[in-house]
Amino acid sequence: MRLKTFLTITSLITIDQGLKALFLFSKKAALINDSSVFLLPIKQVILILLSCILLGLLTGWYIKRNAPSTCNQLYKGENNILQTCIMLIISGGTSNTIDRLLHGGVVDVFLSYELHWNIADAYIILGATAILVHTVFQSQKAKKQI
């Protein structure tokens, strides 16, 4: 199961990095966004360090949660949703951190009006939103059972 998770995360990162490379090498419209998150004035070095720490903590929590004794339970039912969401967030965060290390900023390939984003951003937003929605539905389901 861990190999499946590793291959899934690696595949998601490869898709994002491949698309960014395609845009960069073909000279299509791509933006290297060297501004910080939400335009906060944070230096790139600090942002990379914080990204690595947060990704390390999230990955450590994920591995601990997927200990061999609980692995079979995690891959069944509702916990599969949480696992998929965490994989999306880890993939997106790792891919954006790779961009910061290689290009000095995140490579955004989808540019519309004031919104600049990439596939990794979509992974993060989709994963976080799904966790939020899943948590709300779980709490409502628990209230109904009481």
Image (spheres, helix red, strand yellow):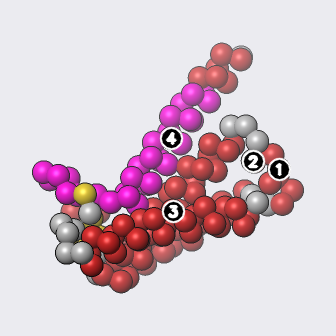
Instruction: Tell me the amino acid under the disc marked 3.
Output: Leu
- Residue most toward the front? 26
CA neighbours of label 3 inside 10 A, class few (<14), some (14 to 19), many (20+): many
Mark carried by residue 130: 4
In the image, residue 146 lies in the stretch drawn in magenta: no
Measuring 50% from the left and 41% from the top, which residue is drawn there? 130
Mark carried by residue 75: 2
Instruction: Tell me the amino acid under the disc marked 1.
Output: Asn
Give the vertical position of 126 relative to 9 (above or below): above
Mark earlier in primary sequence (2, 4): 2
CA gap, disc 1 to disc 4?
A: 22 Å
Image quarter where the N terminus lies is bottom right
Q: Which residue is mark 3?
A: 12
CA neighbours of label 4 inside 10 A, class few (<14), some (14 to 19), many (20+): some
Q: Which residue is mark 1?
A: 72
CA neighbours of label 1 inside 10 A, class few (<14), some (14 to 19), many (20+): few
